[in-house]
Image (tube, rainbow, N blue to C red):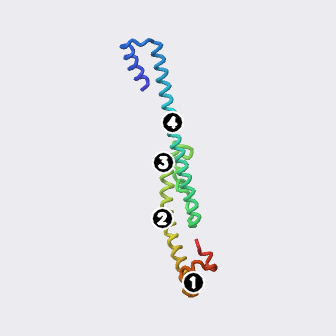
């Protein structure tokens, strides 16, 4: 691209009659602009990769915490990807960030669904405890929810 552009510029400059020192200055300016543009693009892509790493780390942390809370013994969803010898050319873990992100997010979405069901079950049980307490003690559901004896069942 740069070589092709330089040849085109040379043809135009020959036609116009631009002096060699002006040509050199313009080419130096062009090279500097190309270098700046390339550096900006690389920085942009590195920033994108870093954002990917942060999102993967956040998703992994949520997955680990949810698995612990739900007492689900799961191995890291990316563990089998990392052992794939054909993937070792991609990065330090042998997995592209996109592949790692998709693997962890896929499992996280499944765990979120399990967690949502568990929360619903717990809330249903909590309501039944309050209702039973209210019935046994002849009080309203609101009073049962505020009863000191049931402190441990509050959120």
Q: Residue farthest to the left?
A: 15
Q: Position of residue 103 (x, y in %)?
A: 49, 54
Q: Are marks 1 and 2 in contact (CB under 8 Å)?
A: no
How many residues crowd mark 2 within 10 Å: few (<14), some (14–19), many (20+)? few
Q: Is residue 80 above or below residue 39?
A: below
Question: Label 1, on which residue?
Answer: 133
Of circles 1 and 2, the one toward us is 1
Who comes first in sequence, dot 4 or dot 3? Answer: 4
Of circles 3 and 1, the one toward us is 1
Q: CA distance from mark 3 to mark 2?
A: 22 Å
Q: Residue at x 53, y 78 (%)?
A: 127
How many residues crowd mark 3 within 10 Å: few (<14), some (14–19), many (20+)? few
**Which of the pair 75/19 is nearer the observer?**
19
Question: Label 3, on which residue?
Answer: 98
Question: Label 4, on which residue?
Answer: 42
- Secondary structure beneath dot 4 equals helix
Disc tally is 4
Q: Residue at x 59, y 75 (%)?
A: 153
Who comes first in sequence, dot 1 or dot 2? Answer: 2
Question: Label 2, on which residue?
Answer: 113
**Which of the pair 149/121 is nearer the observer?**
149
Who comes first in sequence, dot 1 or dot 4? Answer: 4
Q: CA distance from mark 1 to mark 2?
A: 30 Å
- Secondary structure beneath dot 3 equals helix
Q: Position of residue 95 (x, y in %)?
A: 52, 47
Q: Position of residue 74 (x, y in %)?
A: 55, 61
Q: CA distance from mark 4 to mark 3?
A: 18 Å
């Amino acid at each position: 691209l740069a070589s092709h552009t330089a040849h085109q510029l040379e043809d135009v400059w020959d036609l116009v009659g631009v002096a060699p020192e002006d040509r050199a200055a313009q080419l130096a300016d062009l090279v500097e602009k190309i270098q700046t543009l390339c550096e900006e693009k690389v920085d942009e892509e590195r920033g994108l990769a870093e954002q990917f790493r942060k999102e993967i780390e956040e998703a992994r942390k949520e997955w680990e915490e949810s698995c612990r809370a739900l007492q689900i013994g799961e191995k890291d969803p990316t563990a089998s990807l990392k052992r794939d010898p054909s993937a070792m050319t991609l990065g330090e873990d042998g997995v592209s960030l996109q592949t790692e992100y998709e693997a962890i997010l896929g499992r996280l979405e499944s765990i979120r669904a399990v967690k949502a069901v568990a929360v619903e079950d717990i809330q249903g049980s909590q309501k039944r405890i309050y209702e039973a307490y209210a019935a046994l003690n002849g009080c309203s559901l609101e009073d049962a929810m505020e009863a000191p004896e049931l402190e441990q069942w509050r959120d």
